[in-house]
Amino acid sequence: MQITPPTRHISSPDGADLRLRQAAEQLEATFLAEMLKSAGLGQSRDQYGGGAGEDQFSSFLVQEQAAAMVRAGGIGLSESLYEALKEKEDDR
């Protein structure tokens, strides 16, 4: 099963819009990483050997999994944040 990301509407491809979108996506990825950690993803498991090495790198795995979720469409948080930030910027 292949997941296709939703179509994003970008009003203008200038640098400010791109920076707003990237910031919104980074925030969504950080939020998802925290949710994944709370769900127990990235905790040491005995079957993999555990240890300090696994503990140190598990946060990288969780963060990358969250970023992959955002690239695949996420939960819509980044789009909502982007629209709110864009609206606020347009009001200026």
Image (cartoon, rainbow, N blue to C red):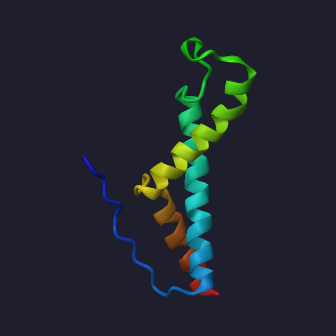
Work out which residue is located at the far top of the displayed protein and give it: 46
Give the percent coordinates (x, y) of residue 46.
59, 12
Residue 14, quarter of the rendered image: bottom right
Going 45% across and 85% down the picture, which residue do you hit? 11
The one of 26 and 52 positioned closer to us in this rendering: 52
Going 61% across and 23% down the picture, which residue do you hit? 43
The one of 34 and 53 positioned closer to us in this rendering: 53
The number of numbered badges drawn on the structure is 0
Going 46% across and 49% down the picture, which residue do you hit? 69
45 relative to 13, above or below = above
Give the percent coordinates (x, y) of residue 18.
57, 77
Give the percent coordinates (x, y) of residue 27.
61, 56
Going 52% across and 29% down the picture, which residue do you hit? 39
Give the percent coordinates (x, y) of residue 86.
55, 78
- Image quadrant for the C terminus? bottom right
57 relative to 67, above or below = above
89 relative to 81, above or below = below
14 relative to 37, above or below = below
The one of 46 and 73 positioned closer to us in this rendering: 46
